[in-house]
Amino acid sequence: MTILIIDPVGGISGDMLLGSLIHLGCPVEYLKGVLDTLPIDGFSLDASLRPVHGIDAVGLTFACADASEHRTFGIIRDTILSSLPGPVKDRAVAIFKALAEAEAQVHGVRADDVHFHEVGAMDSILDIVGISAALEYFAPDAVYSRTVPLGTGTTKSMHGTIPLPAPATIKLLEGRLVRFTDISSELATPTGAAVIAALARKDSPPADLIVRSVGYGCGKRQIPGWPNLCRTILCESLSAKPGLQVYLVAADVDDMLPEDTEAVMAKLYEAGARDAGLIQKIMKRGRPGFCIQAICMSEHLDDVLNCLLKHTSSIGVRYHPVERRVLERRIYRISTLLGDVNVKESILPDGSKRIKPEYRDLAEIAERNGITIAAVRAEVDKALAEGEGQGPRTDK
């Protein structure tokens, strides 16, 4: 399992992060090849080593003939990014979408109508596309971010004088670890914050990692007594891939009406739980009660915790990470004389297959035709034996 850790030692901006990825090992020629697919004329990329407090780092500069600084998210998404390779485009769009949604909330407009000014400048677009391409080059299984330092003071923008960190930056970093400093400078830019918001997981990386390589990128400013560096660290982990590590959330209750648990189960699934259930327990003073448990991915952890605290009588919730092992599987549709049925096919450890039709489909067909579920299942078994099916797809 490959992990990329963004470590904004002294701050993070688009050029600092991309510079660190080049120093990490992403070839400049590869980046130029991806950037050349953009509908942009007259730009050049200069990446050179610069010492920062005795540490070699890559300083990055784009020179662009196009000086326009007013583009909407819709124009950038539908015109400028449309020619990119699929995975690179998806990352770049995700970063710009995070930016647009943050700006929209700050200024009270629709995300598609957000006019990017500083971020809409061509060098910022090239930074974001370059970062997206570099991540495709390294192809990490997961991206994490360490604590982001934030400066203080004010800065000038197209809207006038604004506080630091910029409103969009602080909005993008909601739910992330930050550290407020007394440095009177913009340490984290909206572009850098948007990359973290769009691509980095909110939980912590595995504790035990093997470091494979390290890269440093530097900003253009020299800040006395402050290392204006962004570091990226490429690691290997022996733990499970993302998606195999989940959180187990649990709360014990003995003062709820049992019938209220039906609504709690529904709310947990709405909050993002992958599974949920009740375990009967004998609690203090011999009271009958139950433990409400849910399993969720890290990105849904806060929502699931809040759901349990809001919709149950519990005043505390336990949670901890657990790993799981899942079978490789796919879902496809089977055509029968009675109608189409979704079927889940799992591959067992010995390589054999286990096939199970979707119960809800069986029940719906049985109800519609006035027959038993067993009769519908027999038709599905017959269709499977004859090898019929439509449009296989992976069940993630």
Image: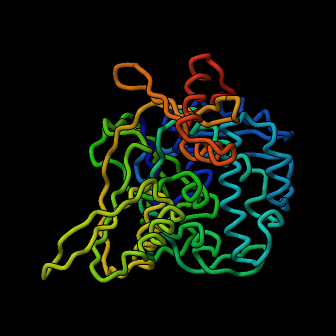
Q: Where is residue 105 in the image (x, y as percent from the top left)?
A: 70, 74
Q: Position of residue 156 (x, y in %)?
A: 71, 76
Tell me if residue 387 comes above or below residue 335 in the rendering: above
Q: Residue furthest top?
A: 386
Task: Decide if residue 283 is on the left or right side of residue 120.
Answer: left
Residue 233 x/y as whole percent: 42, 43
Q: Nearer the viewer, residue 290 or 95?
A: 290
Residue at 62 percent across and 41 percent down: it is 371
Toward the viewer: 217 or 327?
Answer: 327
Residue 128 shows in this picture? yes
Q: Up-down: is 339 above or below 72? A: above
Question: Which image quarter holds the N terminus?
Answer: top left
Q: Which residue is drawn at 61% across and 59% down?
A: 194
Q: Which of 187 and 288 is in front in this view?
A: 288
User: Would residue 127 be seen by someone viewing this image from the given angle?
Assistant: no
Residue sitting at x 63%, y 64%? 190
Report the number of discs.
Answer: 0
Pinpoint residue 350: horizontal percent, then vertical percent: 34, 20
Q: Which colour scheme is used?
A: rainbow
Q: Which residue is drawn at 79% across and 58% down?
A: 73
Quadrant of residue 277 in the image? bottom left
| Picture layout, residue 215 above or below residue 222 | above
Q: Compared with residue 106, is residue 324 higher up or lower down, i.e. above or below? A: above
Which of the 4 image quadrants contains residue 386? top right
